[in-house]
Amino acid sequence: MKKPRVLVAMSGGVDSSVAALLLKQQGYDVVGATMQVWDYSNCNIEEGSGTCCSSTDVDDARSVADRLQIPFYVLNCEEEFRQAVIDPFIANYLQGKTPLPCVNCNTFLKFDHLVQKMRELDCDYLATGHYAQTGKNVFGEDCIRTSQDLWKDQTYFLFTLQQGILQKLLFPVGRLQKSEVRQLALEAGLVVARKKDSTGICFVGDQGYGKFIEENAPKEKLLGQEGWIRHYPSGKKMARHQGIYHFTLGQSRGLGMDHHEKLFVLRLDVNSKTVWVGAEEFLFLDSMLVKDIHWLGVPPKSNERVVVKIRSTHSGVFASVEPEGLNQWRVQFEEPQRAVTPGQAAVFYRVSSEMEKSKELLGGGWIEDLPAFCETDLETPVMKSTNVKVFNKRKSFGENTRSGTTIL
Amino acid sequence: MAENIYLDHNATTPLHPVLREHWNEAMQFWGNPSSIHWAGRKVKEVLREARRGLAELLQVSPLEIHFNGGASEGNSSILASLPLNPVDGKRKILVSAVEHACVQSAADALSMRGYEVVRIPVSRNGELDEKVFMEQLDPTVALVSIMKANNETGVIFPIQKWSKAVREVEAWFHCDAVQTLGKISFFPDSEGVDYATFSAHKFYGLKGVGFTFVRKGAPFQPLVHGGGQERGRRGGTENVVGIWALWKLLPYLQSFESQMRKVKFLRDEFENKLLTLFPDVKITGAGNERIGNTSSLMIPGINGENLMMALDLAGVAVSTGSACSSGTSEPSASLRAMGFSIQEAGTSLRVSLGWFTTDEEMNQFLQILKDIVVRQRAVREVSP
């Protein structure tokens, strides 16, 4: 009987390498592929320094494939990547948002381009090294669940997947702990066993985002980006800046200002090119607007308690979701959240029971612009906008820490 | 999976069985041919005999042949042999638009030295635009570089038809002849060229060894300087085993015609059967004189890269164009230069047969190709 054939997306990292290894051990007819997405010869990334898919990583993936004796292909996806990932990334930054390119990469390259490859190569499945699991939800539908290793869970990046392809997807490392994955790689003698985890965005090197935008954005878009850094709520103009794309919400380092209180970036106003800074307390919101939600599972009922994550490292918070306007939802947090960042994804999970460790990925959407500071708000102790509350300073609330309380 | 079928002979060829058979013989040729003692003498003989045999094959003088590392080196060194900067107003370099990447980039390097590179267009059917060529061919031309047979389409250029005109404007004529030996006859004199380049691995020899014809009196500057090897034309101790293999192959290169008759028959039969199965398939360069082993196909409704990968998974090796060193595949540069769109070039597949390709292999290949094309077209119709 013909063995089922599986196409494995191999980045050259340890997770996708072990995914290929496990599938091979399980008796699949395994085919490996790496997407070459960016010409790394033009950037300063130290090769193999733990980012996704630089050219050394292609060599690593090839070496793992050779070790496993599986056919391996490098797919040139530079054009697709530029259109689907880089261009929107730059456009978002210029609009004062903090984009999340990995979701576009998953949506348009890994689970669109590669699904097509899978079909054309007569493969039965597509596998990746994501920490995620597939399964059934309470309604008996196919669904994606969080991985066994909660710390490594990557379902946050998978919310745009189409229900129809879930049956075709395999996430072989989703049921393992990261330490087990490394152990398997070591035992199999894979060159990538001790390789650093990928962190950050693969195509932005040590130079940082600002520099990347300046080197890659259309020149005319970079003109006239300077503006004021203003203090909230005093309204005081504190300094000039070179472009709002140099700033991220919640950022406190590198503002280059001498002030008696620690300052945080509170808002990026793309219209007036103003960077608003102020005390950390103003970073907390108790609700947010989310647009273009893609529901992978049955959408939550009114008042249903779901868990929402507002960035990949966020531990998740209970919230309710209500439609508000066209293709837009109001997400009410049970506890105020720090640095709700436009351009990042809001990703929802259904909690069937408190005991259940693995949660169902329900879907996700994009965090909308925050209510702007108005001139009339200034020098008033409390902001007028209804969904902004003022709290006493709270430190590192809601960030994922190993020791902290973790919902997901 | 079927037995592996190799149909990518224009990229490289398998080693000829005679080399396997006599492999142990090569082990004795380890001496340095420049040495005066017995170990060197023995090896020097191999070089001399190989050179003499190749010269005989090309009907030129052995003094006009030097060994090197292959055709990319040969092409690069010839183009780099032009004066450092244009002299006497000779500043134009004419190359066909479908030259191999090494000629293209060697020409581009010359443009940094004050030369003007003019690419002569090639039609969708593979013919050089003679009108443009003759218009451009004036006394300011320093060098013309046109290949004999195109590696991707197999189309043969009538070099000899143009050589008189090239000589009249006192330009040097270089011909990349890498796809000739073992497939068609090539005589530098009757073609009327001053330079020609060859590579052993295109005709069942080893990689990393080739040879270049430089007409007596034509300027030549070594790319690799060394201890006077190859009469100062290519420094570095010679690739003796590679040259030994060339020597061993000589009798087979002389009698290539009977092999190629069979190859051409299989190729033509394959094309006819394929066109019967898929009447919308286009054969690039059909109707032109082509080398008998090459079939450049455009199969509407498929993606060449996916087709090539699916064929590989089924054990069949073909290509979608020039192999790219990064391991990714790009739409064929030659087809793009011939005026095909990225989309059209993206549907291309190059099948190139070899001396040892069998009837059975071609039948198997046709069956596998048919199944995959039918399946991939169906998939692409559902989700284009």
Image (tube, rainbow, N blue to C red):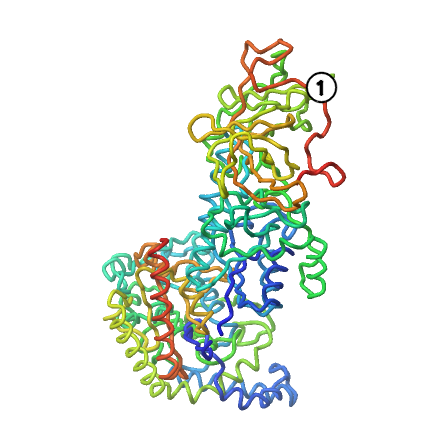
Circle 1 sits in a helix, a strand or a loop, which is it?
A: loop
Q: Quadrant of the C terminus of chain A?
A: top right
What chain letter is assigned to the residue under label 1?
A
Q: Position of residue A174 (x, y in %)?
A: 62, 53
Q: Is residue B273 visible?
A: yes
Among all residues in the image, which is located at the extreme right?
A: A403
Given residues B291 and B105, the one toward you in this image is B291
State the residue at coordinates (62%, 86%). Answer: B40
Look at mark 1 in the image and give the residue it sits on.
Answer: A392
Given residues A65 and A256, the one toward you in this image is A65
State the residue at coordinates (53%, 20%). Answer: A371
Decide: is A378 above or below A149. above
Q: Quadrant of residue B75?
A: bottom left
Decide: is A154 above or below B279. above
Q: Position of residue A73 (x, y in %)?
A: 51, 62
Given residues A320 and B98, the one toward you in this image is A320
Specify whether A280 is left or right of B89.
Answer: right
Q: Quadrant of residue B303?
A: bottom left
Q: Which kind of residue does numbered mark 1 sit on? A: Asn
